[in-house]
Image (cartoon, rainbow, N blue to C red):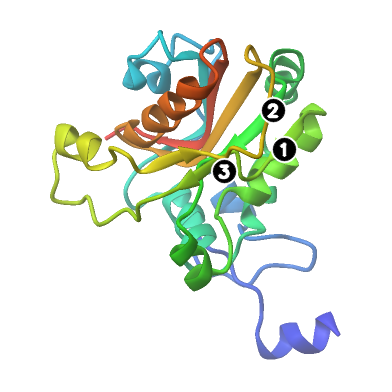
């Protein structure tokens, strides 16, 4: 089955479009070497935690990759989000170093994702971080909650907005799902695919804090923009 299909429609590398050998997923060996891992050794002294600038909200922050325009990481995230390849989430989560997994295994109770608006879910068919987050929760042996947060407003294009405008555009965009009754001091890991200004993560953390004032919130993203 695989051989017949692959002869007609060969699987190609997302980065360079070379034909991939059997059992190789998404990237060829050459493009794998171009992945821009952060290799951070601190969960507070890093670019993402600095960009968030809210020690009152966040206990720690970590990203797997740096995101650069035109880079392999951009190709991966765009394919995951826009081209119906959500299994890239598992592919990326399997690249997370074991010491990072071990840290979160000891320091979180729940894994939570940035929610998609219901209209976006209908159109795309999936939340682009769900598989990544679910696999991460399995690795850290923690509970994955897909719908702790609800997206109440659909995000419009932010390409022409500055940092301040992007932040205020997200006011009242998120709500807390009342069906979940978690302990007030729960340790929550908030997961997203890409952090740019950090506005979405901040608004989501504030929404959680409005219902769970003693919650300890950390952030984990597939990538963080560095330019």
Cβ atoms at labels 3 and 1 below 8 Å apart: no
Residue assigned mark 1 = 144
Residue 154, image x, y percentages: 35, 56
- Residue shown at the point (67%, 68%) measured from the top left: 20
Which residue occupies the foreground of this view, 24 or 166? 166
Q: Earlier in the sequence, mark 3 or mark 2?
A: 3
Please name which of the two marks, 3 or 2, marks the residue nearer to the observer: 2
Residue assigned mark 2 = 110
Give the crowd class for mark 2: few <14, some 14-19, many >=20 residues within 10 Å.
some
Please name which of the two marks, 3 or 1, marks the residue nearer to the observer: 1
- Residue shown at the point (53%, 13%) measured from the top left: 43
The residues bearing labels 3 and 1 have C-alpha atoms spaced at a distance of 31 Å
Residue 206, image x, y percentages: 41, 24
The vertical placement of 209 against 154, above or below, is above
Residue assigned mark 3 = 33
Residue 64, image x, y percentages: 55, 32
Q: Is residue 2 left or right of residue 181?
A: right
Cβ atoms at labels 2 and 1 below 8 Å apart: yes
Secondary element under disc 3, as helix, strand or loop, is loop
Residue 27 falls in image quadrant: bottom right
Q: Is residue 100 left or right of residue 120?
A: right
């Amino acid at each position: 089955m695989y051989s017949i299909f692959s002869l007609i429609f060969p699987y190609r590398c997302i980065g360079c479009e070379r034909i991939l050998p059997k059992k190789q997923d998404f990237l060829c060996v050459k493009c794998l070497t171009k992945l821009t891992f952060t290799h951070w050794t601190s969960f507070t002294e890093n670019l993402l935690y600095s960009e968030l600038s809210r020690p009152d909200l966040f206990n720690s922050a970590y990203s797997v990759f740096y995101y650069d325009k035109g880079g392999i990481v951009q190709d991966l995230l765009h394919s995951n989000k826009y081209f119906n390849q959500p299994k890239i989430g598992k592919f990326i989560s399997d690249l997370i170093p074991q010491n990072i997994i071990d840290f979160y295994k000891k320091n979180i109770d729940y894994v939570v994702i940035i929610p998609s608006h219901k209209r976006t879910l209908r159109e795309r068919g999936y939340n682009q971080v769900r598989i990544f987050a679910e696999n991460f929760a399995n690795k850290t042996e923690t509970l994955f909650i897909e719908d702790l947060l609800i997206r109440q407003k659909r995000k419009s294009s932010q390409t022409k907005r500055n940092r301040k405008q992007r932040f205020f555009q997200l006011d009242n965009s998120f709500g807390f799902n009342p069906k979940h009754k978690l302990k007030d001091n729960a340790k929550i890991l908030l997961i997203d695919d890409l952090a740019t200004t950090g506005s979405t993560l901040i608004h989501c953390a504030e929404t959680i804090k409005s219902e769970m004032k003693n919650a300890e919130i950390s952030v984990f993203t597939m990538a963080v923009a560095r330019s």
